[in-house]
């Protein structure tokens, strides 16, 4: 039996996922049947989206009766495969009722769930990417000395919201030395003349995620920054050019990595070249050194090489691409030229 909480997998498989909170909500799939354990307050919404049998439970009666009802035809459960993003307390409640002999991670079954995007999904991602382009422009426009990282992040968030996104997933604004932290949390540091500002943002449009990174320079860029930017841009271009059906994820990573190594930045490229994207911001395929995943039409992922010079600056240039029948399509429309504001 497979158990899936209100996650991207539930949305993909059931066509709907209710608001995730502490109330147990589980899609249960076995070879005989599929049904959903649903908090009563969400039952109407579920019924509007799916014809799957529902086992509902009310706040004042608790979840155990619904869980027992759902499991009654499936006991004994020999093997239970659990979606990794399902809450631990849901899993504990399920295990207490089902008492499986073996529990494994759904990901270990190697089911290529969500790995190949349909043409409709690619178009949904294209719309999300176009919104990210516009939000990035709002962020670039907001960059000037004296404005804080948090204020720029807010301008981006507002742009996403006004554009119709249901959720802003992250607005990472890392200025000056903060740019050397790949996952910096935007803070109250005011931008200064001479800062490189790394802006990495993403939102959700009808479930599909966006993700883009660009760099803005305030003032006249010094040679060290120009060299770093050129190297990262070259790595981004070479990695994108390497994407086509039949290549491995590792070969795409290598195209970026060898470019940065040749330019002398190998030790400053401290992460993988990219990650898959779709209903989640991070999902397979992983564009990682040595990655054996063979790229096929419909796979969507980021290309985001970067260099991080401690105490000085960071540069990352990130696009979202999709493997096509013969090559690659870049969903990100924002240009790659250096943005210098002086
Ligand atoms: Zn990314
Ligand atoms: Zn990103």
Image (spheres, rainbow, N blue to C red):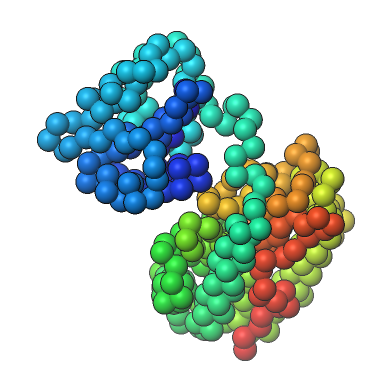
On the image, the x and y values in percent for residue 214 come to: 63, 70
Left or right placement of residue 89 versus residue 159 in this view: left
Nearer to the camera, 125 or 37: 37
The residue drawn where x is 72% and y is 74% is 336
On the image, the x and y values in percent for residue 165 come to: 44, 67
On the image, the x and y values in percent for residue 4 come to: 44, 34
Q: Which residue is at the far right?
A: 262
Question: Taking 73 as reference, is 291 above or below it?
Answer: below
The residue drawn where x is 52% and y is 80% is 138
Left or right placement of residue 49 versus residue 206 in this view: left
Instruction: Report the number of discs.
Output: 0
The residue drawn where x is 48% and y is 57% is 207
On the image, the x and y values in percent for residue 87 come to: 38, 35
Question: Taking 79 as reference, is 292 above or below it?
Answer: below
Left or right placement of residue 87 versus residue 124 in this view: left
Classify the position of the C terminus by image quarter: bottom right
């Amino acid at each position: 039996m497979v158990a899936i909480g209100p996650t991207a997998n539930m949305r993909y498989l059931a066509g709907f996922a209710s608001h995730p909170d502490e109330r147990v909500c589980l899609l249960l799939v076995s070879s005989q049947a599929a049904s959903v354990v649903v908090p009563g307050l969400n039952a109407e919404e579920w019924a509007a989206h799916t014809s799957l049998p529902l086992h509902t439970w009310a706040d004042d009666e608790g979840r155990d009766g619904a869980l027992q009802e759902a499991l009654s035809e499936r006991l004994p459960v020999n093997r239970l495969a659990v979606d990794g993003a399902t809450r631990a307390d849901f899993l504990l409640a399920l295990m207490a009722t089902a008492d499986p002999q073996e529990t494994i991670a759904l990901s270990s079954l190697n089911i290529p769930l969500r790995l190949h995007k349909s043409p409709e999904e690619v178009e949904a991602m294209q719309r999300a990417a176009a919104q990210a382009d516009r939000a990035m422009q709002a962020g670039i426009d907001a960059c000037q000395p004296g404005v804080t990282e948090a204020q720029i992040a807010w301008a981006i968030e507002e742009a996403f919201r006004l554009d119709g996104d249901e959720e802003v997933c992250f607005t990472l604004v890392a200025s000056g030395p903060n740019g050397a932290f790949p996952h910096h949390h935007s803070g109250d540091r005011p931008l200064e003349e001479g800062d490189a500002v790394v802006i990495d943002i993403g939102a959700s449009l009808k479930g599909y995620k966006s993700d883009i990174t660009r760099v803005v320079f305030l003032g006249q860029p010094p040679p060290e920054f120009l060299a770093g930017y050129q190297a990262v841009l070259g790595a981004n271009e070479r990695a994108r050019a390497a994407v086509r059906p039949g290549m491995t994820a590792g070969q795409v990573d290598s195209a970026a990595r060898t470019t940065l190594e040749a330019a002398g930045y190998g030790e400053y490229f401290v992460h993988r070249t990219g990650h898959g994207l779709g209903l989640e911001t991070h999902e397979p395929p992983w564009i990682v050194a040595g990655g054996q995943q063979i790229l096929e039409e419909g796979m969507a992922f980021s290309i985001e090489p970067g260099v991080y010079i401690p105490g000085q600056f960071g540069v990352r240039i990130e696009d979202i691409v999709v493997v096509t029948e013969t090559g690659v399509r870049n969903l990100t429309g924002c240009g790659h030229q250096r943005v210098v504001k002086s």
